[in-house]
Amino acid sequence: MINQCFIEQPTTRKILQDVTSVCTECYRTLKEGEKTYYDMEHYRYLCEECARRLCEEKLERERDIMRYEEETAETPSLFR
Ligand SMILES: [Zn+2]
């Protein structure tokens, strides 16, 4: 499911050296070999835990927007 939001990558030594050695959300130290997730929207790397949480929040927001659009489409005159 996280793959809907972020690009899954193994944490390589190159990422740790050239990009970041911590999760940009919780600042936990990333270890070589564990999974990391690249956030294309914000150009940052996240640990698995943060990626999962942020992805859930993002999908939830999108569901809310869709729900809102459906509701306003069904009742066009109420809130105008
Ligand atoms: Zn994190």
Image: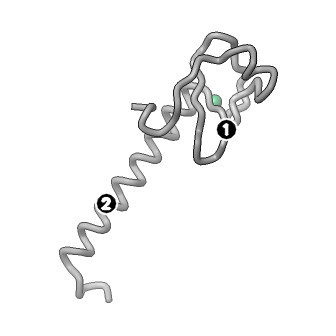
Q: How far from the left and from the top, in percent, is residue 61?
A: 42, 54
What residue sits 39% from the left and 54% below the top? 62
User: In the visual, does 77 lie left or right of 26?
Assistant: left
Determine which residue is flagged by label 1.
44
> Ligand 1 is found in which quarter of the picture?
top right
Q: Earlier in the sequence, mark 2 or mark 1?
A: 1
What residue sits 65% from the left and 32% below the top? 45
* Ligand 1 contact, mark 2 (Cβ < 8 Å): no
Q: Quadrant of residue 13?
A: top right
| Three-letter amino acid code at the position of disc 1 | Arg
What residue sits 46% from the left and 47% below the top? 58
From this view, report whether residue 74 is shown above or below residue 24: below
Q: How far from the left and from the top, in percent, is residue 19?
A: 77, 29
Between 61 and 11, which is closer to the camera in this rendering?
11
| Three-letter amino acid code at the position of disc 2 | Met
Determine which residue is flagged by label 2.
66
User: In the visual, does 24 lie left or right of 56?
Assistant: right
What residue sits 47% from the left and 39% below the top? 5
